[in-house]
Amino acid sequence: MRVRMRLLQVLVVVCGWMAAPGFPADSVVPEAAVPVAATDGSEALPGQQPPNLSASAAEGPDGVALRFMDRPIVTFRGVLAGATPQVRAARARAALGGLPASAFGAPVDALHVSVGGVSGVAFRVQDRLLFALTSDDLAPGDPRTLEETGEVVRQRLQAAFAARRAQLHWPTILRGIALSALGAGVLALLVIGVGRMRSRLETRLQTAFEKHVLQRTARTYDWTGSAMQLVHQIVQIGAVCLALAFAYLYLIFALMQFPVSEPLATRLSDFLWTLVDRFGLGVAAAVPGVMTVIVIFLLTRALQSLVNNVFDAVQSGRLSIPGMHPETAGATRRLVSVVIWGLAITFAYPYMPGAQSDVFKGLSVLFGLMVTLGSSGIVNQLMSGMVVIYSRSLKKGDLVSIGDATGVVISVDALSVKLLNQAKEELTIPNAVVVASTVRNFTTQGRHLGVAISTTLTIGYDTPWRQVHAMLIEAAASTPQVASAPAPYVLQRALSDFYVEYELFATLRDPATRFAAISSLHENIQDVFNRYGVQIMSPHFEEQPDSPLTIRPEHWYPAPAQAPTQASVQTSSQT
């Protein structure tokens, strides 16, 4: 008998420890705090109560619950003969704990009694009085009478006694241990099977991924390693979840084999099925919303395809729409796409699963706050980008000058403009700076009228201005990049104290050759003026020299300079 009681105590302690992490444990009333009734009806001093691990009393908001063999028996709510619900529960626990083993096979009697003028139902086993139930103990709003409630309590006591009697039966314990061991073996086999299935599934998924996805998408970037790592992590998480599910089911199975832990197994099972039911009902309730979201996004995708076709036709010149230009068709398409998808998300948001949950609302508020606080500078750049694009002041391939930067436009993005200068340096200019600066586009008009270049120099009054005009025009005509029509011309910009300021204008064949054309034009001007013995007085001079400071043609190529061959001269003139 003592061996069986010890084994029962160990099982109860183990089951209580297993229940502690996931389920709230019953708060047992301390034995030293409340005087309890001895089995003979007299008051027992604190510390003299017989040990009991099967009965407990938990105080709740609506009374003190009495449990025996981890099964709910009754809840005390009223005061009986001056005893509070806590005291009554402690006395009942002591009475149940003091029952001999023979009492658990005896029937439970329900007696109608009157205590202190209060009628109630007392429960007795053999000649031992356990506790009494009064009308004050009935739950508020419970339609059952005291007699009906007493019958329910009697049946609970009878079931708890049957469980206690079965738990003290050696074959029951041995059978539970054997079945638990068998279940552990099955669990081990299932976990091994999950591990092997994980390896095979991972191999098949990787093969399918490489065959159907990577061969179509991995053209410019090899992201095979990242994809394989993602597949490995997904399969690993799935295998772990499946193994934990099997372990959870085994725990329920093992606890069901012992009467003392059967209520805990029932709670674990109820928790699992409640979770499954809630998930299933949630999925079923979300199906109409998901179908609505799918329809909205399919319609949006069809509308987006139509918009893309229209703007592609405008951008390629196959379709002309008043007020829309091919240069701005790409930006307008992006704007219209953002508006269309924004409206689609707005319409679909109420139908998304979990859209009305507090978590979803909190994330939406957080995202909106982040966008509001961090997008002030970005919005400024985006609006400036819109101005740059729709003003059509520049586009990709144009030779432009923005402030102090001059180069060919290589991209016009939403936030910045990128230039490539003559030194092959990439210059990034924010759109706000582009809007605030003067943009000189040397290419836009050059496609139709040609781009004009100019250079300025000063010549003394001792040189006839007609000769200077002729020499400048001859230098422009000798420049390969300068077009013959319209013809170059010269303007006199100023008559200064010591010299005349001349400016030569010429038209380029190709706007992209601007830098090379200016350099070649300066070279030819120096050669022509030296050939005719005219001194260039730029920028100033203090006194007239005795002889003009010019370089004769025979001295144009001192070492290490090399004179061009006749073939290269003909090729340059043809160009």
Image (tube, rainbow, N blue to C red):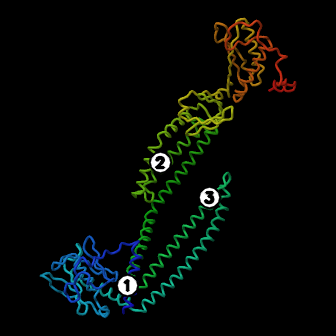
Q: Who is closer to the viewer here, 170 or 346?
A: 170
Q: Is residue 322 visible?
A: no
Res 149 quadrant in image:
bottom left
Q: Dot 2 lies on which element?
A: helix
Q: Who is closer to the viewer here, 268 or 387?
A: 268
Q: Alpha carbon of mark 1 to alpha carbon of mark 3: how far?
A: 54 Å
Whole-percent x, y for residue 464 in the image:
73, 6
Q: Can you tell which mark lies on residue 9?
A: 1
Please state which amino acid type lies under the numbered disc 1: Gln
Q: Residue at x 45, y 69 (%)?
A: 280
> In the current view of this chain or complex, which residue is farthest to the right?
566
Q: Dot 3 lies on which element?
A: helix
Residue that numbered label 3 is attached to: 226
Counting every numbered tag in the picture gives 3
Q: Residue at x 48, y 60 (%)?
A: 291
Instruction: Mark 2: give few (<14), some (14-19) or many (20+) Cα within 10 Å.
Output: few
In screen coordinates, is 376 left or right of 430?
left
Of the 4 image quadrants, the one containing the C terminus is top right
Mark 2 or mark 3: whose residue is earlier in sequence: 3
Please state which amino acid type lies under the numbered disc 3: Ser
Instruction: Mark 1: give few (<14), some (14-19) or many (20+) Cα within 10 Å.
Output: some
In screen coordinates, is 315 left or right of 30?
right
Q: Alpha carbon of mark 2 to alpha carbon of mark 3: how far?
A: 34 Å
Mark 1 or mark 3: whose residue is earlier in sequence: 1
Q: Who is closer to the viewer here, 217 or 117?
A: 117
Whole-percent x, y for residue 385 in the image:
54, 36
Report the mark closest to the observer, 2 or 3.
3
Q: Is residue 571 visible?
A: yes
Please state which amino acid type lies under the numbered disc 2: Leu
Whole-percent x, y for residue 185 in the image:
54, 82
Q: Alpha carbon of mark 2 to alpha carbon of mark 1: how far?
A: 65 Å
Q: Can you tell which mark lies on residue 343?
A: 2
